[in-house]
Image: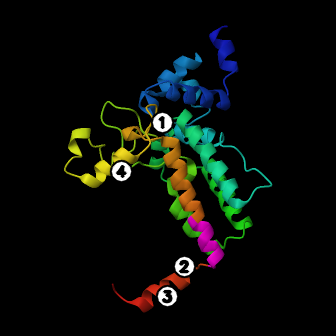
């Protein structure tokens, strides 16, 4: 195929699919440049600027392409199951695109696809009977987990397995076996935990189990507050009446 023929087939969709594939292939977004993308597409770099203004816009559209892979809501299920399914689908999507959490966290504002996804999740909470007040706080509590990632307390050590969000700053490095002896409670829970050698979460914990465990805790807690008729106004009033601790 001649260079001219390749140029005529260049489209925004093809540019984005190729950019995502390059980022997935290794090196993430740091290894992605407009020049490298142009080379992969077989065009001159200037041809890309007919479809994206710069690398910043390219990254925004790449995020939208990734978010667009999240499964749509499933009808005929209760709100907890529906939200759970969407979140776990988002997690699988971001595991396919490990560079995406870093880009999402660096965004100055949500992209259109992100807004559409979050609006859909809010709609699921509201159609399940949750008040706008409780839904507001539920969205805060869920945080980045809604988009399928979370920063783990024990992250992978340098040179070790990648975490679910490999570019997120480390919170606490996993303790070495001989380092937990002075800390009996850490040693106790480390020995009690079920580990998975193939885990992507630091410390060898079962990453899917831990993600689902926290997700279910949040959803069950939100459901409990919904059934109790919880409101933020009542909570604040109770705190004011109780006075300083």
Direction bottom: furthest residue: 241
Mark 2–mark 4 Cα distance, whole angstroms, equals: 35 Å
Mark closest to the chain's N terminus, 1 or 2: 1
- Identify which residue is drawn at 35% across, 46% down: 190
Mark 3–mark 4 Cα distance, whole angstroms, equals: 38 Å
Mark number for residue 177? none
**Front disc: 2 or 4:** 4
Evaluate whether residue 67 shows in this view: yes
Of 28 and 34, nearer the camera is: 28
Q: Is residue 35 above or below residue 150?
A: above
SS state under label 4: helix
Q: Residues within 10 Å of mark 4 (few under 14, many from 20)?
A: few
Mark closest to the chain's N terminus, 1 or 4: 1
Measuring from the top left, give residue 65's x and y in whole percent.
62, 38
Mark 1–mark 2 Cα distance, whole angstroms, equals: 36 Å
Residues marked 2 and 4 touching at CB (< 8 Å): no
Residues marked 2 and 3 touching at CB (< 8 Å): no
The residue indicated by pointer 2 is 232
Q: Main secondary structure of the magenta part?
A: helix
Measuring from the top left, give residue 63's x and y in whole percent.
57, 41
Evaluate whether residue 44 shows in this view: no
Of 182 and 22, nearer the camera is: 182
Mark closest to the chain's N terminus, 1 or 3: 1
The residue indicated by pointer 1 is 99
Magenta stretch: give its range: 221-229
Measuring from the top left, give residue 61's x and y in whole percent.
59, 40
Quarter occupied by residue 158: top left
User: What quarter of the picture does the C terminus occupy?
Assistant: bottom left
């Amino acid at each position: 195929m001649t260079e001219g023929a390749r140029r005529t087939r260049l489209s925004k969709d093809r540019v984005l699919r190729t950019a995502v594939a390059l980022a997935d292939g290794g090196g993430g977004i740091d290894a992605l440049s407009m020049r490298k993308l142009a080379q992969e597409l077989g065009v001159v770099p200037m041809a890309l600027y007919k479809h994206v203004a710069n690398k910043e816009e390219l990254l925004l559209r790449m995020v939208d392409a990734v978010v667009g892979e999240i499964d749509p809501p499933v009808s005929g299920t209760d709100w907890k199951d529906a939200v759970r399914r969407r979140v776990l689908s988002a997690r699988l999507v971001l595991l396919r695109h490990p560079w995406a959490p870093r880009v999402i966290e660096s965004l100055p504002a949500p992209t259109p696809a992100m807004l559409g996804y979050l609006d859909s999740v809010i709609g699921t909470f509201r159609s399940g009977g949750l008040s706008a007040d409780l839904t507001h706080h539920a969205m805060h509590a869920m945080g980045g987990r809604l988009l399928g990632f979370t920063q783990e307390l024990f992250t992978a050590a340098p040179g070790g397995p990648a975490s679910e969000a490999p570019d997120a700053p480390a919170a606490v490095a996993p303790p070495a076996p001989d380092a937990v002896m002075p800390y009996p409670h850490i040693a106790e829970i480390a020995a009690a935990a079920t580990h998975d050698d193939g885990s992507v979460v630091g410390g060898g914990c079962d990453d899917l189990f831990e993600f689902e465990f926290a997700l279910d805790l949040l959803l069950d807690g939100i459901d409990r507050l919904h059934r109790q008729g919880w409101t933020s106004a009542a909570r604040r009033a109770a705190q004011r009446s109780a006075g300083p601790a």
